[in-house]
Image: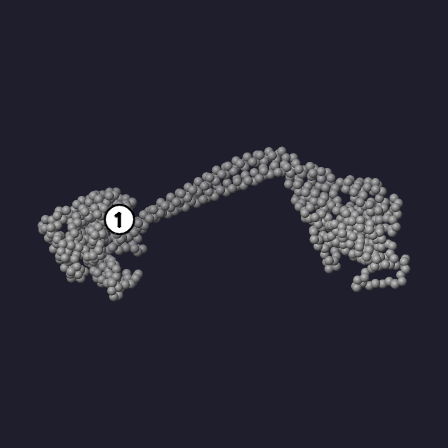
């Protein structure tokens, strides 16, 4: 027995406990496959020794491989249902088939070809749970992660492809030390039934005839169970060592009921890719290697028995997550730190540049002459003065136009002239008053001007001989003459010498004489545009 | 596996380690984020300072040009009484001199106090206020040419900028008498003397 310091990180290593009728063998899985094996008897002494070993050794996962006589296999058909119904159905069937054991397993082998097309299920069980309990108690007490409980028969399915026995009816015979001769029958690669027969001690009887007798016996058994039709030939695959193979070769002659295939354990090992396997009559190492290499799903163990395996995986997951979290945090933190250092360097550069320009700016400002307002405000003030100049007004332009027009009408005399400058062509001439909009038609110049000069010219005709028609014509012509000037926006006659509109009242004498005639007054409003908006 | 089947002692150390890892990683991330944010804020502050000062520095050239172009005119307008305080005494002296020179029979004036005014056209006044002082002129003239001569003298001699707001001319007698002191026409005009100044009592001073 060996011992080594306990370690919590042994999950990559694993072990198999091969449990036979008389002994339990612990196989260690190493870098190159199986590395060592320890054998324990199945009596109390052996169990205690096993307990000491498990207590002293690292807590790596354990795969329990069972090879006992007390194994049963039943093929049954159950109605095809799904999900929880299927599980419940199987549970009930197994309880009925295998009383007194909880180590049961169901394998589905497809559906019946005819009729209801029920599911074909092979139920298997380890019917002697007491054979396992002492070992399981030790594993639980030492908190050994139990990956699962497996049977050699079910595991044998993995050998069939390498034996080219995955189709048709096949019988596999292997010899195990501490167990006996395992005979497993397969149909199209699926286990249908298996039995373990006691094997006489080597040398006491010739193994060749013994094995062949067992083959015949089981073939008849299969016929009786109707698992193998009477006339159907059976492919018999026997795994032995070189010596027994040589001994059995002349005995194994094919006939219409059996075809023999002798395979040495060395040959089978090499087909499985197993290196460094010692030639042996027994297949214990081969099965142990297969189990630890393939790590199949658990077959017989329940949740409580495999809890330490689940917990160990959870523990390793948490350790891995911790590592990932720390690495991620470190990476994120590292990136953040690098970014921060980058910003710091940028800050220093910006600060230096700011200081540089600050000094330059102060030097440049010191050179500037002192002004009462800022430079841009100086410009604003100068532009504002220019704008005031542009809007400077005088009545002279309009008076010049009026004077030119009056030159053609010497009879028109000016009595009064009122003038206003405004940005609104409709501004009132009366200070403080605004005309009602409905009294005047608003002026809307086609071409907008910057400013307008609005004037009212009041005058009279002299001499006036009472010819109102001539007077009216003269005033109208005068207004028309004014309109012809450029930039005159509007000329309106506010008062004619005689108001001949239908709304006015007229009084006078038809025989009026010169000297007694009323004065022929007139009044005009003139709007002159000054400067265009684009100026 | 039921809850009661779980042996927490198996997971204890791993759980503690996981929590420590979370705490450590969280602290690392939070710390780095905080530090990064802090450095970024400091960088932004310095960068803003740099941008502001570089803009001001580049603007100095422009300011120098503006001062070179506009300050002489600003000073001239100040001397003319368009920017800053108005030159009222000069106005009075100019009116008197004009009356004597033009031999205007009668010239009266009334000058109101300076008030803020808003023109009836759009202006950009910046920090400045626009002011206007109303001056009413009443004159009896030989002919309308006297009025324009008076305005021309004001244009040439008076310090400041004015605009005529309104005018009213009226014939005083039907027959024009061409004697030097004849009063054939009367005119009443309103002038607005416009100035630009800074708001408040101090105003612009050079």
Quarter occupied by residue A499: bottom right
Q: The residue tagged with tag 1: helix, strand or loop?
A: loop
Quarter occupied by residue A380: top right
How packed mark 1 is, by other alpha carbons closer than 10 Å (few <14, some 14-19, many 20 or more), is: many
Q: Which quadrant of the rendered structure holds the N terminus of chain A?
A: top left
The one nearer the camera, B191 or B1, is B191
- Colouring chosen for the image of the structure: one colour
- The answer to whether one can see residue A134 in this image is no
The one nearer the camera, A315 or A94, is A94
Q: Which residue is drawn at 85% across and 63% down?
A: A507
Q: Where is residue B73 in the image (x, y as percent from the top left)?
A: 69, 38
Work out whether A168 lies above or below B81: below
Q: Is residue A241 left or right of residue A341?
A: left
The one nearer the camera, A206 or A412, is A412
Q: Which residue reaches farthest bottom?
A: A115
Q: Mark 1 points at which residue?
A: A61
Q: Residue at x 90, y 57 (%)?
A: A515
Q: Is residue B206 left or right of residue A133?
A: right
Q: In this view, does A332 lie to the left or right of A90?
A: right
Q: Which residue is drawn at 77% across and 40% down?
A: B156
Q: The disc numbered 1 marks a residue on which chain? A: A
Q: Which residue is drawn at 76% across and 48% down?
A: B165
Q: Where is residue A312 in the image (x, y as percent from the top left)?
A: 30, 49
Q: Position of residue B3 (x, y in %)?
A: 31, 55
- The answer to whether one can see residue A319 in this image is yes
Tally of numbered tags: 1
């Amino acid at each position: 027995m060996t011992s080594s310091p306990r370690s919590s990180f042994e999950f990559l290593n694993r072990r198999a406990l091969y449990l036979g009728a008389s002994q339990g063998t612990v196989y260690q899985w190493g870098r190159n496959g199986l590395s060592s094996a320890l054998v324990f008897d199945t009596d109390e002494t052996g169990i205690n020794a096993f307990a000491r070993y498990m207590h002293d050794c690292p807590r790596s996962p354990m795969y329990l491989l069972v090879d006992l006589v007390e194994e049963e296999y039943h093929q049954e058909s159950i109605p095809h249902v799904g999900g929880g119904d299927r599980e419940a159905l199987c549970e009930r069937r197994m309880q009925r088939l295998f009383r007194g054991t909880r180590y049961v397993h169901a394998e589905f082998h497809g559906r019946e070809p005819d009729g209801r097309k029920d599911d074909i299920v092979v139920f298997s069980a380890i019917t002697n749970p007491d054979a396992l309990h002492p070992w399981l108690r030790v594993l639980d007490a030492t908190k050994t992660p139990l990956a699962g409980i497996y049977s050699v028969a079910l595991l044998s399915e993995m050998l069939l492809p390498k034996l080219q026995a995955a189709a048709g009816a096949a019988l596999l015979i292997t010899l195990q030390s501490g167990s006996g001769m395992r005979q497993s029958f397969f149909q199209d690669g699926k286990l249908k039934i298996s039995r373990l027969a006691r094997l006489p001690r080597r040398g006491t009887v010739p193994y060749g005839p013994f094995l062949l007798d067992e083959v015949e016996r089981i073939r008849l058994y299969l016929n009786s169970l109707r698992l193998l039709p009477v006339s159907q030939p059976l492919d018999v695959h026997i795994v032995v060592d070189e010596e027994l193979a040589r001994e059995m070769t002349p005995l194994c002659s094919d006939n219409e009921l059996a075809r023999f295939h002798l395979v040495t354990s060395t040959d089978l090992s090499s087909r499985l890719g197993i290196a460094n396997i010692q030639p042996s009559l027994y297949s214990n190492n081969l099965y142990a290697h297969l189990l630890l290499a393939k790590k199949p799903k658990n077959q017989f163990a329940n949740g409580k028995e495999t809890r330490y395996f689940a917990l160990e995986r959870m523990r390793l997951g948490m350790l891995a997550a911790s590592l990932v979290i720390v690495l991620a945090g470190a990476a994120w933190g590292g990136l953040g730190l690098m970014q921060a250092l980058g910003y710091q360097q940028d800050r220093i550069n910006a600060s230096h540049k700011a200081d540089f320009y600050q000094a330059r700016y102060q030097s440049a400002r010191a050179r500037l002459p002192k002004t009462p307002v800022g430079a841009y405000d100086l410009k604003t003030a100068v532009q504002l003065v220019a704008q005031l100049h542009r809007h400077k007004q005088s009545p002279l332009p309009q008076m010049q136009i009026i004077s030119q027009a009056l030159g053609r009408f010497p009879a028109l005399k000016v009595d009064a002239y009122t003038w206003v400058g405004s940005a609104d062509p409709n501004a009132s001439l009366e200070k403080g008053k605004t005309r009602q909009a409905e009294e005047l038609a608003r002026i809307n110049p086609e071409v907008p001007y910057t400013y307008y000069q609005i004037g009212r010219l009041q005058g009279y005709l002299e001499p006036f001989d009472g010819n109102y028609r001539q007077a009216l014509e003269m005033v109208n012509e005068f207004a028309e003459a004014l309109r012809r000037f450029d930039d005159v926006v509007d000329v309106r006659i506010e008062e004619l010498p005689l108001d001949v509109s239908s709304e006015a009242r007229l009084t006078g004498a038809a025989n009026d004489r010169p000297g007694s005639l009323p004065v022929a007054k007139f009044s005009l409003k003139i709007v002159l545009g000054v400067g265009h908006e684009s100026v | 596996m039921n809850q009661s089947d779980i042996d927490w002692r198996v997971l204890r150390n791993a759980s503690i380690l996981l929590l420590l890892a979370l705490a450590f990683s969280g602290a690392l991330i939070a710390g780095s984020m905080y530090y990064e944010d802090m450095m970024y804020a400091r960088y932004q502050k310095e960068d803003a300072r740099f941008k502001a000062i570089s803009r001001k520095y580049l603007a100095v050239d422009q300011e120098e040009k503006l001062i070179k172009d506009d300050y002489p005119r600003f000073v001239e307008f100040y001397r003319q009484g368009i920017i800053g305080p108005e030159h009222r005494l000069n106005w009075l002296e100019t009116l008197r001199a004009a009356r004597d020179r033009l031999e205007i029979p009668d010239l009266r004036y009334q000058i109101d106090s300076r008030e803020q005014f808003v023109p009836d056209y759009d202006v950009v006044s910046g920090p400045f206020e626009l002011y206007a002082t109303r001056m009413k002129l009443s004159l009896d003239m030989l002919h309308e040419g006297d009025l324009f001569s008076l305005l021309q003298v004001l244009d040439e001699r008076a310090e400041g900028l004015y605009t005529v707001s309104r005018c009213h001319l009226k014939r005083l007698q039907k027959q024009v008498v061409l004697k030097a002191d004849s009063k054939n026409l009367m005119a009443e005009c309103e002038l607005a003397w416009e100035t630009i100044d800074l708001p408040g009592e101090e105003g612009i001073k050079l």
